[in-house]
Amino acid sequence: FDEMADDIVARLDAVEREELLELERRRAALRTSGDAQHRRWDAFLDLYVAGYDFKEIGARMGLTEGTARNWLWKIRKH
């Protein structure tokens, strides 16, 4: 849960092109989903990758810090 945006970027730089395409496909599926929760997860990921911490993400999205942390776990599981 404590992975920082710079760590994510470093991992993404190290992955294969096919993996990046799959990641983008999954993000697009969240973004265009008929499920409002999935669209909110995509907005969460935008903030997370931009480097916002869980407290900031929670404040911007109307969540508690704990809920924001929990969302990352749920998104990864999804």
Image: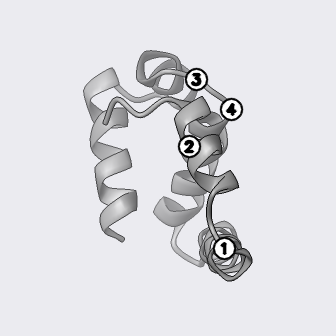
**Amino acid type for the residue under numbered disc 4:** Ala
- Is residue 50 shown above or below 43? above
**Amino acid type for the residue under numbered disc 2:** Ile
Residue named by callout 4:
50
Asked if labels 3 and 1 touch by Cβ distance under 8 angstroms, the answer is no
Which quadrant of the rendered structure holds the C terminus?
A: bottom left
- Disc 3: CA contacts within 10 A as few (<14), some (14-19) or many (>=20): some
- Is residue 38 shown above or below 59? below
**Disc 1 element:** loop
* Residue at point 68%, 32% (across, down): 50
Query: Which mark is nearer the camera, 1 or 3?
Result: 1
Query: Which mark is nearer the camera, 4 or 2?
Result: 2
**Amino acid type for the residue under numbered disc 3:** Tyr
Residue 18 % position (x, y): 68, 82
Which quadrant of the rendered structure holds the N terminus?
A: top left
- Is residue 46 shown above or below 77? above
Residue named by callout 2:
8
- Rounded to the nearest angstrom, the CA distance separating label 2 from label 1 is 14 Å
Location of residue 58 (image quadrant):
top left
**Disc 4 element:** loop
- Rounded to the nearest angstrom, the CA distance separating label 3 from label 2 is 13 Å
Asked if labels 4 and 3 touch by Cβ distance under 8 angstroms, the answer is yes
Residue named by callout 3:
52
Q: Which mark is residue 16?
A: 1
**Disc 2 element:** helix
**Residue 10 appears left or right of 35:** right
**Disc 3 element:** loop
Q: Earlier in the sequence, mark 2 or mark 1?
A: 2
